[in-house]
Amino acid sequence: MELHIDQPRLEDELDQLAAFSSEAAPVVTRIVFSPADRQARTWLKALFAEAGLSVREDAIGNTFARWVGSDPQLSPVGTGSHIDAIPNAGKYDGTVGVLGALEALRALQRSGFRPKRSIELLLFTAEEPTRFGIGCLGSRMLAGSLSPGAASELRDAEGASLDSLRGEAGFSGDLEQVLLPSGYYSAFVELHIEQGPILDTEGTAIGIVTSIAAPASFNIAIEGQGGHAGTVLMADRKDAFMAAAELATIIERLARSSGAVDTVATIGKCDLFPGAVNSIPSKVKLTLDLRDTDLARRDLLLESLYSACREIGERRGVAIEINQLNADSPAECSAVIISAIRRSCERHQISSRSMVSRAYHDSLFVSRIAPAGMIFIPCRDGISHRPDEYSSAEQITTGVLILAETLAHLANATEYPA
Amino acid sequence: MELHIDQPRLEDELDQLAAFSSEAAPVVTRIVFSPADRQARTWLKALFAEAGLSVREDAIGNTFARWVGSDPQLSPVGTGSHIDAIPNAGKYDGTVGVLGALEALRALQRSGFRPKRSIELLLFTAEEPTRFGIGCLGSRMLAGSLSPGAASELRDAEGASLDSLRGEAGFSGDLEQVLLPSGYYSAFVELHIEQGPILDTEGTAIGIVTSIAAPASFNIAIEGQGGHAGTVLMADRKDAFMAAAELATIIERLARSSGAVDTVATIGKCDLFPGAVNSIPSKVKLTLDLRDTDLARRDLLLESLYSACREIGERRGVAIEINQLNADSPAECSAVIISAIRRSCERHQISSRSMVSRAYHDSLFVSRIAPAGMIFIPCRDGISHRPDEYSSAEQITTGVLILAETLAHLANATEYPA
């Protein structure tokens, strides 16, 4: 079987998808359930239908596009990724794993290949935590890592509930139906840009992911005392922002001194109240995103953080409350999928290496219910979540070829990969 | 002349004014040119008219309500304050100097007093910097401290221009007409809550302001490099927020160690870009409000700040730009006004003390074109710019009595106070 990937068509489709954005190019901002997201979904479903895939959507908007296999009773092979994009992002994160998978299926169709197991292309809802403060919303619910009850309580920054927003976007079914049974997929493979510099620096074409790092995220609320910026003397202040600033410098120091480069900490949001030039902030809300490849090291950092919060709170007379949004365990990828990817690379003499995924992916949650794996392609300078995020059409095409062969192999395997 | 201040009426009017707010009581939020501000202005103009005052408004919305004197050729005595309120504020800041002045005029009228000089009650536009980032907008323009050209370039956070916003509020005249000639007022007296703890702590009824502290305010823009919160290692980051946090802790330390309690520094706003949980901030905008009673000490702190910015910028690989919005000189109050206030206190055996105003007031700018003075009354625990800001009706009434007698004295003086 020789596969031909239609590189110009895939490039063109990535450009078209990037144009569904609430901001002008090159910026891509596509928040889940926004007009841009909804328009992009409509456009994608037409492409799925054109490729002869049968489409269903669940109550949270996860979209399943199935190429029915010759033995439809067998559990299907899954692939896919997400299309939502954080504010001021680029055009490859997630989208390569959706449009790339679609092109992989079309290439297999053109080659005359007929899968035994069905192959299902999945578009996950809200991999990015932008709107609801929790990442991988769709895949979490598929895997039962987020209950329908907890999901129903989610609200966006404007206070709109998940239920009302998904309803407006046309997804009004029962959230209880989102959960997939364990074993629903015989295997799941996600194609994604690395979002880190290793492949680009080394000049390696394919990263074969062996495990996905363990992320944790937190809301930190600090409450001090407001007052007039001119009249409250420094010694009498309980300035919530100054407490937040001190805490941020401590978090940075803890992450830098954990003993491993794999520890990273990010404060991505900082909201001040009342937020006036001449008013001492009485309240601050921070978000903290903390990741490590080692769970014990991450937990050790957290202990130091809690103790720093107690000390700062007492010394400054402010209340600091840390609310853990999630703290997931790392995932190990399936050995059978890893070896299928490796064999495909070897067959084409494409350079590859094993690696850890430092970023958060839907595959992390799919791995709770199915053997999962990931194929990484390089992105320039490791840059992601920015408008200048970039992978070349050749790099993407290579990834799609490896994905297509891996899917073909898994679809015709008679045994579950372990 | 014995004056009777109508305390219940004044209390009631302060309550009514507080109800013009974009947030529910006890919060007062009344941003300039907002519906709440416009409704409050309409209500106030009706009260001015009811008291027989003739009202005119200038192109920026400063409102002049004149009690015409027996010799209308003489330059009038001025009084007044502001009614705009920062987000989440209380009901006494500014308003006591507007409604208190109105009651002072009504009390003088009821007593049978007839002023020789006209007495003009002034409602200043936008004392608070909330909307346009610059405080004392109306009084600055009256005094020529802000040019019509510079004012026309002001925009609010949504990008709406001052010109369009004042136009919508009904103030469409030529900004060139706002400037008052030097000598327009023979004297100007503002009644205000202290916004600090001294009078309340001492149990002193009246503060006689001898000088107004020198404020300076700045926008600080920090530009680093964004990226994915999971994949960019700590050593490779140019996190704009972490740079901002370090800078904030340095600013706090500089203010605390200036050698005088009179140095205060506040970061009231902090905006992150892109502002997503899992994205390293590439840009941060801070505001800095810096005040001192001593200009040289303030300038010394600024030098240290600039040098800290250079050091942080180089070490972290971020660009830090400091843009000075204003840096005003302190004002000395008029000796004649000070002694008129003091004599009135002595006459009634009301406790008083001389003091410095640490807060920013419209009188700071009026002092550029006229002899100016201020009367302070206590506020509980020195709290201001918060919903629990409080002065008792008795404390306000005492202030209004002293204001009324001071205005009467100044209105019948044949010579300018020096």
Image (cartoon, coloured by chain):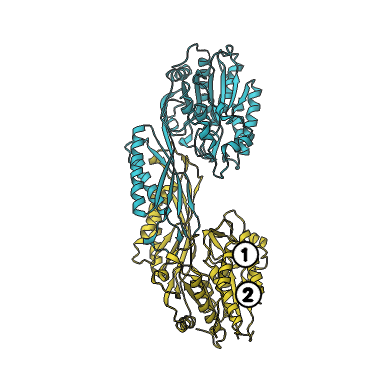
Chain colours: A cyan, B yellow
Quarter of the picture containing the N terminus of chain A is: top right
For residue B139, what is the image quadrant?
bottom right
Mark 1, residues whose alpha carbon is within 10 Å: few (<14), some, or many (≥20)?
Answer: many
Give the camera-side residue of A194 and A172.
A172
Do the residues under discs 2 and 1 have CB atoms within 8 angstroms?
no
Q: Is residue B295 above or below residue A405?
A: below
Give the camera-side residue of B31 and A70.
B31
Mark 2, residues whose alpha carbon is within 10 Å: few (<14), some, or many (≥20)?
Answer: many
Separation of marks 2 and 1 at Cα, in angstroms: 15 Å
Q: Position of residue A388 (x, y in %)?
A: 52, 39
Query: Which residue lies most toward the front here?
Result: B8
For residue A111, what is the image quadrant?
top right
Q: Amino acid at mark 1?
A: Ala
Q: Amino acid at mark 2?
A: Ala
Residue B310 visible in the displayed image: no
| Residue A29 appears left or right of A297 | right
Q: Position of residue B126 (x, y in %)?
A: 57, 65
Which label belongs to residue B65? 2
Nearest-to-viewer mark from 2 and 1:
1
Residue in view at x 55 percent, y 73 percent: B7
Give the camera-side residue of B54 and B278.
B54
Give the camera-side residue of B258 and B38.
B38
Residue to which mark 1 is pinned? B40
Q: Is residue B392 above or below residue B243?
A: below
Q: Is residue A210 above or below residue B160?
A: above
| Residue A109 appears left or right of B321 | right
How many callouts does the rendering have? Answer: 2
Q: Position of residue B245 (x, y in %)?
A: 41, 51
Of labels 2 and 1, earlier in sequence is: 1
Mark 1 — on which chain does it sit?
Answer: B
Residue in view at x 52 percent, y 33 percent: A149
